[in-house]
Image (cartoon, rainbow, N blue to C red):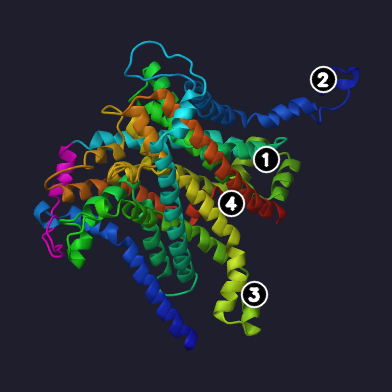
């Protein structure tokens, strides 16, 4: 676009501004290492996955890997196991996100009031999120849900095997316990960004607490709820630790979600081609969800720019 | 009077909720100081003679190399993330490049790509290069995992540097290194620390890549816990000791960074 032509008067003029082209590259320079690193590490494996998804490749069978076009996609999309995994992913993700959001909202409303020891309670409430996820999963599996010496049966009696009787609920409970603090923090930030003068004015005008919550707080919280829900979904859709350690996808395929199913296809069945096709399908589904997420984030972002 | 009463009531409710939420963690720590027969008793035992036996057992089973691997992967990836993300965030905020929003959204979109879709090619590539079960593979992967988060977070902190002060500095002839050292750093360093702590937390807790790409040589702390998945017999107290031990660094980092936690988790979108 712009070409640098050496002009005779260049020496006479003081070099106040470098040429626009050079200036652009100077501006770009700090960005490039991170950009190149991200492209190398995240985009190239994905292109390779695309390529692998067109091969018939079972690592247990010797010989070459013939090109089979879209065959793996046909297998994957007509496979019952994968469809079950898709349904399970939706149930587990939606269950965990919805319950942690409701609990997180209740806790954020409690923490938004002033009371003695509020910072301590906040710290207590954040703690579950900080426990290593696989440690949390094993803690719930062995110390809480176990039929013989778990805490639930220990306190309330009975001998229910919680994990085999209610596998999805057991996984969701563990996830909700870990993710409620995340939702709470985002919603609390939303509550605290409300203008106290406007709320006070509403109170003076005779609005009761419920009316204020319903008409003012909830609409104000809307984008924070959206952000929490979408970020939570993006993290939780990839849940692996809890499935791997609590249920191993069982009983049967009751808790096998997409990441776990793809893991099984790759490292237990060694169907590399099919696993790659399933991976591509997951990426496409994620892109759909992520498009919504980006829209929410960019709306928050415009608000911030507008200030 | 009425208001004070309702604050006391709701405050009490909040305290009860906080204690219920943290209770599994308290139970984990309590159990880690029990003898195995106390840990496996039904009804649960509340009074017991505390012992460090389980922690000794965990160290006997050689948890140390796992902790050291985690420490290495987390610290080196965090350093690398900060080195890459801070200049990038600078080029996306203070002196923005053309089309800086595109770059910003490219970074966040890499965060949204499920790791499971990239696992196989990464595994095959690492195998081909002889880098399976190598801690530096994990350093590189954790760097790319945390990079978008760090870029977004650092950008939101850099935007807080007042333009006027920077411009005044330039007019006074301050060079770039000087204005970084004298103007930008003092404002941004708490944010830098928070970003580093959050990247450390995510790297330390990462399980999916670690379980598939490491084994004995480069196994990280979460991998040490895999042995407890289907344990039989008396092991609950030892599991709790190991779980407490591996969670401790993140608990401390998280408590320290808690005021900035929400900003990191929302990629800087929520202050």
User: Label 4: which residue?
Assistant: B269
Task: Give the label, 1 or 2, closer to the camera.
Answer: 1
**Mark 3, chain letter?**
A
Is residue B200 visible in the rendered image? The answer is no
Label 1 vs 4, first from the N-terminus:
1
Give the vertical position of B148 relative to B127 (above or below).
Answer: below
User: Label 2: which residue?
Assistant: A4
**Mark pair 3, 4: CA separation:** 24 Å
**Do dots 2 and 4 share one subunit?**
no
Pointer 2: residues within 10 angstroms few (<14), some, or many (20+)? few
Looking at the rendering, the stretch of residues picked out in magenta corresponds to: B40-61
User: Where, by quadrant of the figure, is residue A143 drawn?
Assistant: bottom left
Front-most of residues A295 and B23: A295
Q: Secondary structure at mark 1?
A: helix
Pointer 1: residues within 10 angstroms few (<14), some, or many (20+)? some
Q: Which mark is residue B101?
A: 1
**Mark 2, chain letter?**
A
């Amino acid at each position: 676009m712009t070409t640098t032509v050496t002009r005779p008067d260049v020496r006479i003029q003081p070099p106040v501004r470098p040429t626009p082209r050079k200036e652009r590259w100077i501006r770009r320079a700090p960005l490039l290492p991170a950009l190149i690193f991200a492209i190398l590490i995240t985009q190239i494996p994905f292109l390779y996955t695309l390529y692998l998804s067109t091969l018939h490749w079972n690592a247990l069978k010797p010989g070459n890997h013939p090109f089979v076009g879209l065959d793996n996609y046909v297998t994957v999309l007509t496979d019952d196991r994968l469809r079950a995994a898709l349904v399970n992913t939706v149930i587990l993700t939606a269950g965990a996100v919805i319950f942690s959001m409701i609990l997180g909202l209740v806790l954020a409303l409690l923490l938004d009031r002033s009371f003695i020891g509020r910072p301590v309670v906040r710290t207590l409430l954040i703690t579950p999120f900080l426990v290593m996820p696989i440690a949390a999963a094993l803690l719930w599996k062995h110390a809480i849900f176990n039929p013989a010496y778990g805490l639930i049966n220990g306190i309330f009696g009975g001998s229910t095997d919680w994990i085999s009787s209610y596998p999805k609920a057991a996984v969701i409970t563990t996830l909700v316990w870990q993710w409620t603090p995340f939702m709470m923090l985002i919603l609390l930030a939303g509550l605290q960004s409300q203008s106290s003068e406007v709320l006070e004015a509403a109170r003076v005008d005779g609005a009761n607490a419920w009316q204020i919550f319903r008409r003012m707080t909830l609409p104000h919280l809307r984008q924070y709820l959206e952000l929490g829900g979408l970020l939570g979904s993006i993290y939780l859709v990839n849940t692996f630790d809890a499935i791997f350690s609590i249920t191993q996808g069982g009983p049967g395929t009751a808790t096998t979600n997409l990441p776990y199913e793809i893991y099984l296809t790759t490292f237990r069945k060694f169907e590399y081609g099919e696993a790659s096709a399933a991976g591509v399908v997951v990426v496409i589904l994620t892109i759909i969800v992520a498009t919504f997420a980006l829209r929410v984030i960019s709306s928050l972002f415009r608000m911030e720019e507008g200030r | 009077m009425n208001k004070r009463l309702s604050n006391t009531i709701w405050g009490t409710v909040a305290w009860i909720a906080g204690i219920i939420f943290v209770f599994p963690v308290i139970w984990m720590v309590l159990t880690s100081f029990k003898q195995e027969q106390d840990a496996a008793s039904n009804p649960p035992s509340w009074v017991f003679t505390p012992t460090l036996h389980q922690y000794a057992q965990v160290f006997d089973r050689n948890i140390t190399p796992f902790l050291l691997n985690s420490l290495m992967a987390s610290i080196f990836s965090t350093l690398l993330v900060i080195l890459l993300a801070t200049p990038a965030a600078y080029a996306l905020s203070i002196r923005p490049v053309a089309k800086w929003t595109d770059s910003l959204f490219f970074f966040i979109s890499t965060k949204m790509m499920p790791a499971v879709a990239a696992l196989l090619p990464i595994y095959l590539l690492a195998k081909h290069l002889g880098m399976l079960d190598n801690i530096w593979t994990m350093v590189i992967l954790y760097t790319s995992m945390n990079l978008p988060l760090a870029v977004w977070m650092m950008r939101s902190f850099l935007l807080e540097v007042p333009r006027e002060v920077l411009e005044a500095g330039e007019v006074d002839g301050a060079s770039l290194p000087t204005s970084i050292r004298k103007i930008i750093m003092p404002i941004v360093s708490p944010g830098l620390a928070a970003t580093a702590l959050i990247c450390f937390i995510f790297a330390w807790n990462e399980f999916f890549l670690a379980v598939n790409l490491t084994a004995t040589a480069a196994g990280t702390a979460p991998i040490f816990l895999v042995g407890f998945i289907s344990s039989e017999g008396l092991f609950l107290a030892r599991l709790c000791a190991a779980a407490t031990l591996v969670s401790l660094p993140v608990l401390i980092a998280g408590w320290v960074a808690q005021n900035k936690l929400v900003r990191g988790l929302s990629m800087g979108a929520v202050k």
